[in-house]
Image (cartoon, helix red, strand yellow):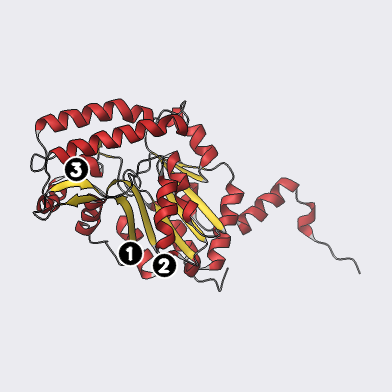
Amino acid sequence: MIYHVPWIYTPVRTVLAIWHQLTKTEIPELAKCSVLMRERSRVEETIHCMQRAGAGNLQVISDFDMTLTRFAHNSKRVPTTHNILDNRLLINEDCTKKMRELLNTYYPIEIDASRSAGEKLPLMVEWWTKVHELLIQQKIRKDMLARAVKESSAMLREGYKVFFDHLAEHQVPLLILSAGVGDVLEEVIRQNHVFHPNVHIISNYMDFDHTGVLQAFKGQLIHTFNKREGALSHAAGLRELRGRPNVLLLGDSLGDLTMADGVSEPQNVLTVGFLNDQVEERKESYINSFDIVLVKDETMDVPNAILRYITSSRDNK
């Protein structure tokens, strides 16, 4: 008896298209025009592996400024945690002027695609050190930080509540590794009512004296290009992160790609990069470095969709 299988006569290209349709990751957000991927098949395979392993094997590691926060809103830059301190409650006009001069000098270097991380590193140390010295001179009061955050135009990305709440609901730890100011960062997420117990923060924290006045910054300086050292020295001590070999990493700088270096025996690492500025100049390097690149996307739509898929029931997959 001869059996006829109609689809074997279908052109190969059509068969491949049907097969892809059947096997592709069920995340329509990845088809957005703002999403770029060098190897879509690898991204899908990684997401499938993470989904099969479940939420119990997952951790999320994220940058904060311009990653969890917006880069801009209504064509105006949203302040970073350092910029939030630019408030007359905390610093004077002269300090503001000097901090802006430093920003105008060093930020173009930070995002210069023609310079290596090795070239940038000492200049970033120089920038952060000068900024922290200026802030210490201002004798900032701890009890004024909450008001400064409230009066600022700081904004988390659209969809932030779903992101934070979903991770908390599924007991997935969120490690925020930030070169910003930890005290300000905490206040931003606290005022947005998403500082859940699963959130852990490694950042530059202020050291206040017994009267509540800033006298120094604690511990090792964390800047854009030494996050690997921060991850290795701090993350290993976080018990909640142990036994979670799958990582969703979110960042907006190539320096953020080292944030998962502190993970013990990683199995699947999916990197998502927010390309906020100088798109054409940096697009190629981002596509070659991150698994997924989000171009001028001020939302958490794609990370939320990936997390929704990874934490969904495995019974039907």
Q: Position of residue 276 (x, y in %)?
A: 37, 37
**Amino acid type at image mark 2:** Arg
Q: Earlier in the sequence, mark 1 or mark 2?
A: 1
Q: Earlier in the sequence, mark 1 or mark 3?
A: 3
Q: Earlier in the sequence, mark 3 or mark 2?
A: 3
Question: What residue is pinned by disc 1?
Answer: 165
Question: What residue is pinned by disc 2?
Answer: 239
Label 3 crowding class (10 Å Cα cut-off): few <14, some 14-19, many 20+? Answer: many
In the figure, residue 126 lies in which quadrant? Answer: top left
> Is residue 114 positioned above or below 268 on the image?
above
Q: State left or right for residue 291 relative to residue 104.
A: right
Residue farthest toward the bottom in the current orientation of the protein: 315
Query: Which residue shows up at 38% across the image and 43% down it?
Result: 297
Mark 1–mark 2 Cα distance, whole angstroms, equals: 21 Å
Residue farthest toward the right in the current orientation of the protein: 1
Asked if the residue under mark 3 is in contact with the one under mark 1, i.e. CB atoms within 8 Å, the reply is no
Label 2 crowding class (10 Å Cα cut-off): few <14, some 14-19, many 20+? Answer: few
Q: State left or right for residue 260 relative to residue 128.
A: right
**Residue 158 visible here:** no
> Is residue 39 positioned above or below 314 on the image?
above
Q: Position of residue 23 (x, y in %)?
A: 62, 58
**Amino acid type at image mark 1:** Asp
Label 1 crowding class (10 Å Cα cut-off): few <14, some 14-19, many 20+? Answer: some
Query: Which residue shows up at 30% across the image and 47% down it?
Result: 69
In which quadrant of the rendered image does the C terminus lie?
bottom right
Front in this rendered view, residue 99 or 168: 99
Question: What residue is pinned by disc 3?
Answer: 84
Front in this rendered view, residue 253 or 292: 253
**Amino acid type at image mark 3:** Ile
Q: State left or right for residue 96 relative to residue 231.
A: left
In the figure, residue 132 lies in which quadrant? Answer: top left
